[in-house]
Image (cartoon, rainbow, N blue to C red):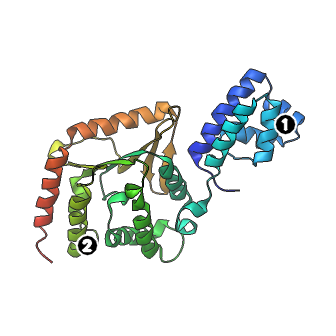
Amino acid sequence: MADGTTRGKRRLARFIKQLQEKSGLTAEEIARRTRVSRPTVTRLLAGTHLARWPSVSVILDELGAAPEQKTFLLQMWEVADVDNATIEHAAALPVKYRRFRMDELEAHRERALDSTHVHGLLQTAAYAEAVAHASHRVIVGDCWDRTAAAERLTRQQLLDREEPFEFHALVDEAALRRMVGGPEVMRGQLDHLVEVAARPNVTIQVLPFGIGAYAPLLSALVLLDFPEPDAPCAAYTEELSGLAMLEEQEEVEPLDGIWRDAAASALPPDESVEFIKAVRDTLGDR
């Protein structure tokens, strides 16, 4: 069974729970009537496990799902059952990051705030390799630094896909001035930021030192918005062990507010590009 996207499983669970509430059946009763194991039913309803479709189909029949509802939920199950093979280098990716990537593929808009490094969708291969090399203590597997460089480039295909994908990055001045990989790597990275900022679907804003404090103890924050009208925004915060995913609205709303406040304090996009160019000039020529 594929890992499945976290949000895909939870979205499927919300619809099945609506049918369960209407039926009045408990998880134990559903398991007994369908002969599907109780843990499988419980985890399916909680959105933590994606059962095989035959089991889901039997449960839906027991809950009285109409044919059109089953067709709709089968489509939703197929989305949740995304295989890791759809992501290049999946086997080499840490589990938390792999699940984030699977969710990112389904988003139509991504908003990011990075206070220590340039965001992955904006990294050059050399910069990505240098960041990954510095993270070797918390990454399992050999040669992750070289794999990370290739993974970043394939991930950045999101910015070129046919389906609309918006990316809005807030980049702290510290990330622009931190000498990741040395002067040559940083020159290439800053030049790349200026180039990418010219894309119509990319917005880059700089958070200069002069604005002071703008977010409580966040090194990185990513917000993903999805095309379905019922799909909640998902938030991801950086931890030492990887990205932590939040989807409950009482947890996401404050983080969404933090991002919006920071965006309001940041330099406008055109001034941000000029700021990046000025930092680049301090590094001299190659």
Q: How far apart are marks 1 and 2 (CA)?
A: 58 Å
User: Which residue is drawn at the image coordinates 28% and 68% (left, top)?
Assistant: 180
Position of 127 with respect to 82 (left or right) is left
Can you tell which mark lies on residue 185?
2
* Towards the viewer: 275 or 201: 201
Q: Does residue 48 show up?
A: no
Position of 1 with respect to 95 (left or right) is right
The kind of secondary structure element at disc 2 is helix
User: Which residue is drawn at the image coordinates 23% and 70% (left, top)?
Assistant: 188
Position of 179 with respect to 2 (left or right) is left
Residue 59 location (% of width, % of height): 80, 36
* Towards the viewer: 208 or 206: 206
Q: Which of the 4 image quarters holds residue 21?
A: top right
Q: Where is 159 relative to 92, above or below?
A: above
Residue 175 location (% of width, % of height): 26, 58
User: Which residue is drawn at the image coordinates 69% and 42% (left, top)?
Assistant: 74
Q: Which amino acid does label 2 sit on?
A: Val
Crowd band around label 1 with a 10 angstrom C-alpha radius: few (<14), some (14–19), many (20+): some
Q: What residue type is labelled 1?
A: Ala
Residue 203 location (% of width, % of height): 27, 48
For the N terminus, which image quadrant?
bottom right
Q: Where is 162 relative to 139, above or below?
A: above
Please name the residue that numbered disc 1 is placed on: 31
For the C terminus, which image quadrant?
bottom left
Crowd band around label 2 with a 10 angstrom C-alpha radius: few (<14), some (14–19), many (20+): some
